[in-house]
Image (cartoon, rainbow, N blue to C red):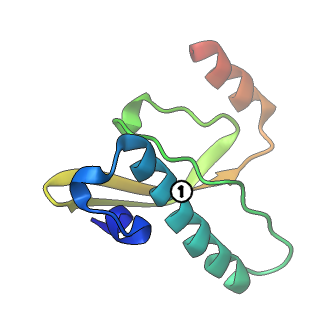
């Protein structure tokens, strides 16, 4: 497991919070490197690690730019890059749907 290696722990000593923190740190590393090659001024938010089906998550005022669906050790994983929108109607509609 990647997070166990990052923490230098045995896999059985890694807890759910460790997994979330480790995946967030990996996203920061990848995002920092990605930002170096993106054009013009850009900003990246802190990563969001969601442990659960992607169908139940909502990110107001964003739209997906890139999505990668894969299987890791028999478990589904989705990695998504979301782009901020300025559509306040979308923000209100998403908030009202909650």
Q: Is residue 80 visible?
A: no
Which quarter of the image is occupied by the N terminus? Answer: bottom left
Q: Residue furthest right?
A: 41
Q: Tell me where residue 52 appears, x and y as whole percent.
A: 35, 36
> Percent x, y for residue 9?
33, 63
* Residue farthest along the bottom direction in this orientation: 37
Does residue 72 sit above or below 90 in this rendering? below
Under circle 1, the secondary element is: helix
How many labels, in total? 1
Residue in the picture at 22% in, 61% down: 72
Name above or below for residue 83 compared with residue 34: above
Residue 46 image-quadrant placement: bottom right
* Residue 39 x, y percent position in the rendering: 77, 81
Which quadrant is the C terminus positioned in? Answer: top right
Side (left or right) of 10 relative to 82? left
Task: Identify the residue at horizontal 72%, vertical 50% (top origin).
Answer: 84
Is there any visible trace of residue 3 in the rendered image?
Answer: yes
Q: In terms of image quadrants, where is residue 44?
A: bottom right
Height in image: 68 above or below 13?
Answer: below
Residue at 54% of width from left, 32% of height from top? 58
Q: In the figure, is residue 12 to the left or right of 79?
A: left
Front in this rendered view, residue 9 or 70: 9
Residue 92 is situated, as x and y percent measured from the top left of the image, at: 73, 21
Q: Nearer the viewer, residue 45 or 87?
A: 45
Q: Is residue 15 left or right of residue 57?
A: left
Q: Residues within 10 Å of mark 1 (few under 14, many from 20)?
A: some
Residue 29's image quarter?
Answer: bottom right
For this rendering, which residue is in front, 35 or 91?
Answer: 35
> Residue drawn 56% across and 74% down?
30
**Residue marked by disc 1:** 24
């Amino acid at each position: 497991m990647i997070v166990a290696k990052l923490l230098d722990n045995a896999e059985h000593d890694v807890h759910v919070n460790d997994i979330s923190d480790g995946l967030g740190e990996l996203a920061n590393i990848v995002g920092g490197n990605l930002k170096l090659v993106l054009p013009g001024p850009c900003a990246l938010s802190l990563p969001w690690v969601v442990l659960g089906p992607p169908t139940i998550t909502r990110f107001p005022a964003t739209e997906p730019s890139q999505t990668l669906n894969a299987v890791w050790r028999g478990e589904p994983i989705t990695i998504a890059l979301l782009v901020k929108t300025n559509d306040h109607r979308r923000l209100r509609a998403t908030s009202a749907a909650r």
